[in-house]
Image (cartoon, rainbow, N blue to C red):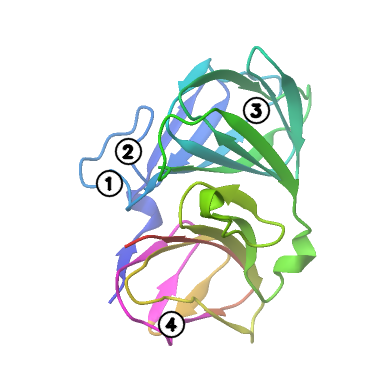
Amino acid sequence: MPVLFPAQTRGRLQQAGIDSVHSFSSAGFVDRKRMGFGALRVLTEECIAADTALPPQRRANMQVLTWVRCGVLAWSDGDASGEVPGGCVQLLDAGHGIEQVERNPSAEHPVDLVRLWLQPAVLNTAPRRLEGWFDGTARDGRWQMLAAGDADAGDTTDGALPLRLDAQVSVARVRPGEGLAVGVRPGRRVWLQVLYGNVKIGEQALEAGDALAWDREDDPHATIFASQRPAELLRVELPG
């Protein structure tokens, strides 16, 4: 049976124009029972206020996947700079180490984003940064792959950003009356999080922020049904 992680058990941090909710221990939120799920080490939903910069950050041997849902996120790492608009996903593969600064360049509008940290299967590689735009209509009633791996083995899904890990990160939008299979395979881990809306999986009712975790279980019939209005979900499949 999957394990339920209610939304209210997540950590919330509000400081200097940054409002973030943490599924696992990260930044100033520490819960020794929530130190990650397999190779998924960080999962946050963040809102960055207008004209706000995040503190400088150094990352190493971590793959940081940032999905900007609305607004624009600007970044700079000393060698290059750019902006990630709404609808785009950026993969920062930190490799042997990279420093960067992120900020919201808008004087009026916030940035809403979802961020994941994934441990790579290969360490101390050269840092790389990749970006892709994903059509929101392509996730209606089905899983849209944002990132997949293993990049080093050439095992990637068309359109998905290549991870150095045998994993998949997908999103889907489900409307009332529609069903969508979770896709739980034997020997794999699956983290499923409701981003907005209400759904049912079997007898389990889930609201925005709730998550279910399957840890190397065989549950081929797990199916998502939206309850009263469209729901959006994040699915992360990981090695067992």
Mark 2 is surrounded, within 10 Å at the Cα level, by few (under 14), some (14 to 19) or many (20 or more) other residues, namely many
Q: Amino acid at mark 4?
A: Ala
Q: Who comes first in sequence, dot 4 or dot 3?
A: 3
Proximity of marks 4 and 2: CB atoms separated by less than 8 Å: no
Magenta residues, start to end: 204-224
Q: CA distance from mark 2 to mark 1?
A: 6 Å
Q: SS for tag 3?
A: loop
Q: SS for tag 1?
A: loop
Quadrant the N terminus occupies: bottom left
Quarter location, residue 86: top right
Can residue 230 be seen in the rendering of this structure? no
Instruction: Report which residue position mark 4 lands on.
Output: 222
Proximity of marks 1 and 4: CB atoms separated by less than 8 Å: no
Instruction: Report which residue position mark 1 lands on.
Output: 34
Instruction: Report which residue position mark 3 lands on.
Output: 49
Q: Amino acid at mark 1?
A: Arg
For residue 202, above or below residue 173 = below
Relative horizontal placement of residue 233, taking residue 84 as reference (left or right): left
